[in-house]
Amino acid sequence: MLYLKIPETRYSGWCAMRVTVDYNLCDSHGECMTAAPEVFEIRDDDKLYVLDETPGDALRDKVEAAARRCPKLAIALADG
Amino acid sequence: MTVVVVGASLAGVHAAASLRAAGYTGRLTVVGAEPHEPYDRPPLSKQALTGGPDAYPLTVPCPDVSWRLGRTATALEPGAVRLDDGTVLPFEGLVVATGAAPVRLDPALCLRSLDDARRLRRALAAGAERVVVVGAGFIGAEVAAACRVRGVAVTVVDPVELPLLRACGRLLGSVLADVHRERGVRLELGHTATSVEAHGVTLDDGRFLDADLVVAGLGARPATEWLRGLTIEDGVVTDDTCLAAPGIVAAGDVCRWPSATFGALLRVEHWTNAVEQGGYAGRRLLACLRGEPAPPPYDPVPYLWTEQFGHLVQVLGVPAPDDEIRVVAGDVRERRFVAVHGRAGVVRAVVGMDWPGKVRRLRALVAGAAPIEEGVPA
């Protein structure tokens, strides 16, 4: 879910995120890399590499922005 | 507290979602002229015409929204929006996201809405064999490519000398012209359609192009006729935080805002801007309603892409037809390259074909308004 804020009380004050990419949809547009370069990188081989599949909560806003801005809706965020 | 969002396509939906995500708990009404659930447009000129599904619903969560779909806003009044069924919606906050309407050239089909795409699909499925497309912009070029993929003869007419010249610049335009010709698209560039009928198009030099289907891709005009009391100049003019007036923001194809990076007013008709600006406008409006400081100014690097004949073509920035263009990586003849566009010595766009990693890495040249020499390898 791209815009839901998970209540902080569920995870004792911090929330884990799991990032997954559907590589059948990904075309390496790279908007994700612009939004969250700590997590997404398009390398010289033009492939998307997820640098951290469970980024910390401090990156939540950036990672959610990355998922929203993907033209192919290839990025999914889940809890845990 | 009531916020009304007028426009239920990408920008409006992202504005609504962003308001809720930022903690807005008041009433939220989204008005959309089309009767359909919000949907995505880019696939309508691509996979929807080459065997994909006809519809691509948006999946952006907008909790606690009152939807008024199939209703058109007819007038902005002080503190209220009047709809075509006579309803008046009072508001404390308003998002103007009514987008742009296609220029029509009846009886040619246009391609903007889901209903347009369904009409075009039906015409192609019914066995159209000779298509004439008026306009060599995004719609024209993508429809022409879809026709060739379907094995249908297609001619594209436009007074411009290169397809996509205005949006993508001279280099991409000339490469795409070559690609289209190689794949069998007949290009009648430098020509105007002086009359359009269902069975064909007359050109300015007197020739008649037979067709069993004519499609018009002539661009779109921002939908601002319903707005009174705002500054309107090819779109709703806002400040650098997308604010058009106290309590009123604009976003997406309808919005013209001052760009710090480009030192000019911009209006961008592309997907990424609708998403980003819709989200930003929601946050900006909430700050206004709460009496909080505005977020930092909206100053994106515009992004657009097109997919034609299996090539991914990208533009980061704002190209212009007379830019100085330098290829900085790859080979144009191999159809895999990246180039920078310079205007008054400053990088204003990075363009590329089939090299998304390199294009993305050079984005910083545009964001930083770098001198063009910085972009060119020694």
Image: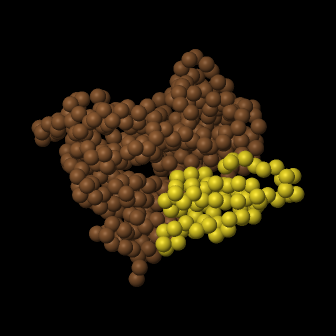
Q: Is residue B102 visible?
A: no
> Which chain is represented by brown in the image?
B
- On the picture, is B219 further left or further right than B154? right
Residue at 60%, 56% (x, y): give it. Answer: A75
Whether residue B79 is situated above or below residue B235 in the rendered picture: above
Name the quadrant of the C terminus of chain B.
bottom left
Residue B363 position, x and y percent, is 50, 66
Question: Tell me, what colour scheme is on the image?
Answer: by chain
Residue B133 position, x and y percent, is 27, 41
> Which chain is represented by yellow in the image?
A
Whether residue A42 is situated above or below residue B265 in the rendered picture: below
So how many labels did they put on this image?
0
Whether residue B161 is situated above or below residue B359 in the rendered picture: above
Q: Who is closer to the viewer here, B229 or B172? A: B172
Residue B249 position, x and y percent, is 61, 40
- On the picture, is A53 further left or further right than B308? right
